[in-house]
Amino acid sequence: MSRELLVGLDIGSSNIRVIAATLLEDFQLEIIGYSQLKSKGIKKGSLINFEAAYSSVDEAIAEAEKMAGTEFESAFVSISGAHIYSLNSSGRVTITNPRKEITVDDISAVINASKTVQLPHGKEILHVIPSQFIVDNNEGIKDPHGMVGETLEVEVHIIAADSMALQNFRRVVERAQLGIEEFILESVASAEAVLTEDEKNLGVLFINFGGGTTDISVYQNGVPVYSSVLPIGGEHVTNDIAICLKISTSEAEKLKFEYGYACSDFIERDEKIEIQEMVISRRELCKIIEVRVEELFTLIFSQIEKYFPSLSSIVITGDSANLNGLVDLLKKMLGEKMLPVKIGKPRFDGEVQIIGFQEKLMTPGFSTAIGLLLIGVINRMAQSELEKGSIVKKIIDSLKSIIGK
């Protein structure tokens, strides 16, 4: 196999991250360049200033290209925002060939049948993710290829996005002289980098706690069954601190990570902090943080309430997952539910081995960018298997995220 270049471009409300890697033998990845810059022109996952967004994306790409020593042609690009919409659907087809053997064409047909759903105006499908196939009422089948039967059904999770939002981000990226291989929902990408197969199979609430948005996913039996995006993130915590303490947002951001703790119960009442020639109570600072973060988690829990009985854990990643005390606050809110909670970082020892810059990139903020690369590898694996005539097993078993367009 030639050393193909794969690029992930994570366009966040707080940061733009670019990671480039070469695809080695046996589908290993060697990271050769990356960048991280503050994003401009993007708020709550939406484009609000085209020129500012283009400038920050272009600069981030140029910096990563300089480190990698090569120009990039295309990238897998993240997308988020409150315009994201998801639903569960199903499809059914009759097996028509005389031998009743299920072929790749049958699988393609049943997945296409599952996509015939009524979407809100202006939405287009990003991902169609099969949860199970059903052959003649026999459920729980992951790979029906080669089986025989009269009927084939599929249950899928569909994720859609606003068409205009995709077009605007496409224009930004293409103006920066970079092609787009595919748009990937942030939570889908970061889950590839962070979650283990056990976590996905046993049932996990996955939270990508970003700067301007928070992506939520529930995984069961290896695949997502619920996805949404809330227009609330770490920047809202920062703004609350700035307003309450009458300081700049840059100083508030610094305070949040240096002295902040999301669960104020753990902070002594008499502990003080000195900032800008004034003394404040650290517990007061942490209470400001706690109120906003608790509001966010309350919204999340209300959305996924029906899934709680089947959850085995909660995993949090993303830019704002570095906020101290998140795990303690969640455990306090969960009370008797007693679910394990952890901060998720990119895994470099998964099915796809990743080498290079591990220490610098093994942070929650890089989860999405790393996941974009992994999805790029999955796509290449599927292409390779297609050439060998055995695409279905790789798509259903190795494809943990997307059956695309």
Image (cartoon, helix red, strand yellow):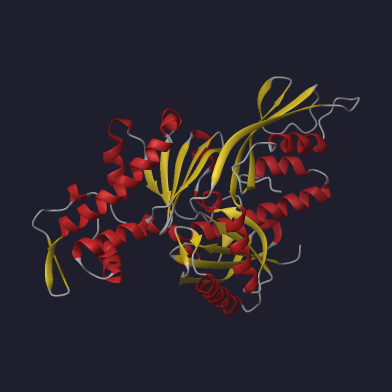
Who's the residue at 79% across and 27% down the image? 147
Where is residue 355 drawn, in percent x and y? Answer: 57, 63
Q: Is residue 238 above or below residue 307?
A: below
Who's the residue at 43% across and 35% down the image? 304
Where is residue 202 drawn, in percent x and y? Answer: 49, 34
Q: Is residue 1 above or below residue 150?
A: below
Asked if residue 36 can be seen in this view, the reply is yes
Where is residue 43 drawn, in percent x and y? Answer: 44, 62
Q: Is residue 136 left or right of residue 218?
A: right
The residue at the far top in this view is 137
Where is residue 21 drawn, in percent x and y? Answer: 62, 66
* Camera-side residue of 277 and 137: 277
Q: Is residue 263 above or below residue 4?
A: above
Instruction: Give the position of the N terminus as an image quadrant.
Output: bottom right
Who's the residue at 75% across and 40% down the image? 392
Asked if residue 353 can be seen in this view, the reply is no
Choose top left, top right, bottom left or bottom right for residue 50: bottom right
* Camera-side residue of 40 and 275: 40
Q: Is residue 107 left or right of residue 83?
A: right
The residue at the far left in this view is 270
Choose top left, top right, bottom left or bottom right for residue 313: top left
Choose top left, top right, bottom left or bottom right for residue 285: bottom left
Q: Is residue 387 left or right of residue 78?
A: right
